[in-house]
Image: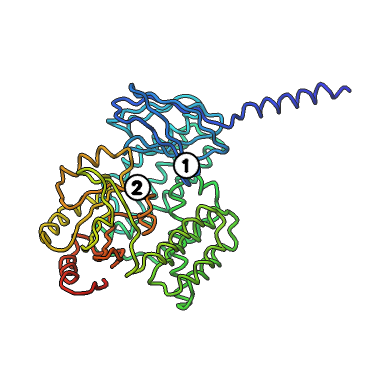
Amino acid sequence: MKNLPILSLVFTTLFSCAQNEKPYVLFSGHINNNKETIIEIANSGKSFQKEVAIDSIGNFKDTLYIDRPGSYYYQIGKAYSTVFFKPGYDLTVSIDADDFYRSTKYTGKGSEVNNYNVARGTLKSQLVGDAKTFFVVPVDDFLLKIQKNKEAFLELLENSGLSGKDKELQLKIIEYDYLLTRNNYDKFYAYHTKEHPELPVGYYEPIKQMDMDDEEAFENIQSYRILITESWRLHLKDAKKKNPSLSVISHVESQIKDIKSPKIRDLIVSMLFKQMTLKNENYEADYPKIMTMLTDDKMKEKLTTRYNSVRDTKPEMAAPEFNYENHIGGTTSLKDLKGKIVYIEIWATWCGPCVKEMPALTQLIKDFKDKNIEFVSISIDSKNDYDKWRKMVPEKNVGGIQLLADKGLKSDFMLSFSVGLIPRSILLDEEGKIITDKAPRPSAENTKDYLDSLLTRNKTTKL
């Protein structure tokens, strides 16, 4: 009986702690010079997504129900940033839309780690600067540079006051950012100089030897998620050298057998989605093999979509229908275009490479004026960018038929062709059948000759 008061105290303490662990985050803020009406919030896997209204003076506030700590993304217009949420946080952010990244400041519970992240981003911008200047240096100088940068980030962390789990996570971020920068050296050097640097033996060993089963890092660190795929490619390259006949599926099976994290296993398996192509004669047999390795339902749906796209959009098959808003009014369907070859260019107002293709597309339209070919530009802009689409079309004055897909990338037509990266060009014949779902871009050297060949033959030809 003497122990009852103690037990009561322990129970009360535990109950109070449980009560304090609120399964949600209070997130609010004020945006100066704001022109947007919503802030979009999501985690890396998009299992959590929410749109929060921004009022007329730039304020927003909402309760976000999350069950575990993690990194989230919020986007306001075209600007976006990361924020770390933990159940129980009461976080307020202040942002100037005219100086989005440098002006961001947090207050309230959870502000310490998030203000550190802002400081780390600022320091990274200062240390890296111009990409060409940063990467186009001898490899020894580059390795010395990124090691010094790593030490600067560690010093910033030591002076931040963070401790415990928060500090441990930031240490991982510093390490994986370092490894990703190391991995990117060859890519950026070659991009700027048009030649590959000579790398010392074992250059990629730190990346190949990294922990491939860190679910905390996977949930919170973008560079880690990228490194998982980069490490996978490096291991595949080594395995192919040892056994040229090794199948990619067999390699993945060996890679994932000791990985406990379902999310990381699924990410590695998703590298096999590229097998769903007509270039792979065994894609139909590979589909069920890959499916059995997946655990997440959404990943299974993505694989099935890719498989169906290859199966249902082969050359000479009827193209899936569409009926989209026309910029000049009304709607235009694929049936309306029957009788002409149809060159479809898929784009968006926010896509830089798409905009760069516009002068070449304009010239193609002029070159084939009065010929039996219709040029159709289909924008995948979201509802938020509708006004930008309405404005950009007359500004660029490309010509042809200008349409807007009803649901962006989730439109049936886009899903049927597994449209992911844009710009994307598709060619259909006079009967609405597929010539190729990956036609040459408007700026490609052979595009004009290729289209000429289609127009001067009695039957369509394949690319």
* Disc marking residue 309: none
Horizontal side of 294 relative to 6 (left or right) equals left
Q: Look at the image and name its color scheme.
A: rainbow
- Observer able to see residue 206: no
254 or 447: nearer the viewer: 447
Q: Amino acid at mark 2?
A: Gly
Residue of label 2: 408
Quick one: SS at disc 1?
Answer: strand
Quick one: SS at disc 2?
Answer: helix
Q: Farthest right residue? A: 1
Quadrant where the C terminus sits is bottom left
- At x 16%, y 46%, the residue is 396
* Residue 54, quarter of picture: top left
Q: Is residue 133 above or below residue 388?
A: below
- Observer able to see residue 161: yes
Disc 2 or 1, which lies upstream in sequence?
A: 1
Q: Are marks 2 and 1 in contact (CB under 8 Å)?
A: no
- At x 25%, y 37%, the residue is 387
- At x 44%, y 41%, the residue is 154
Residue 180 on image: x %, y %: 41, 53
430 or 270: nearer the viewer: 430
Q: Amino acid at mark 1?
A: Asn
Q: Is residue 379 above or below residue 210?
A: above
Horizontal side of 246 relative to 340 (left or right) equals right
Residue of label 1: 43
380 or 456: nearer the viewer: 456
Of circles 2 and 1, the one toward us is: 2
Q: Is residue 280 above or below residue 23?
A: below
Q: CA distance from mark 2 to mark 1?
A: 20 Å
Residue 266 on image: x %, y %: 52, 57
Residue 279 on image: x %, y %: 38, 72
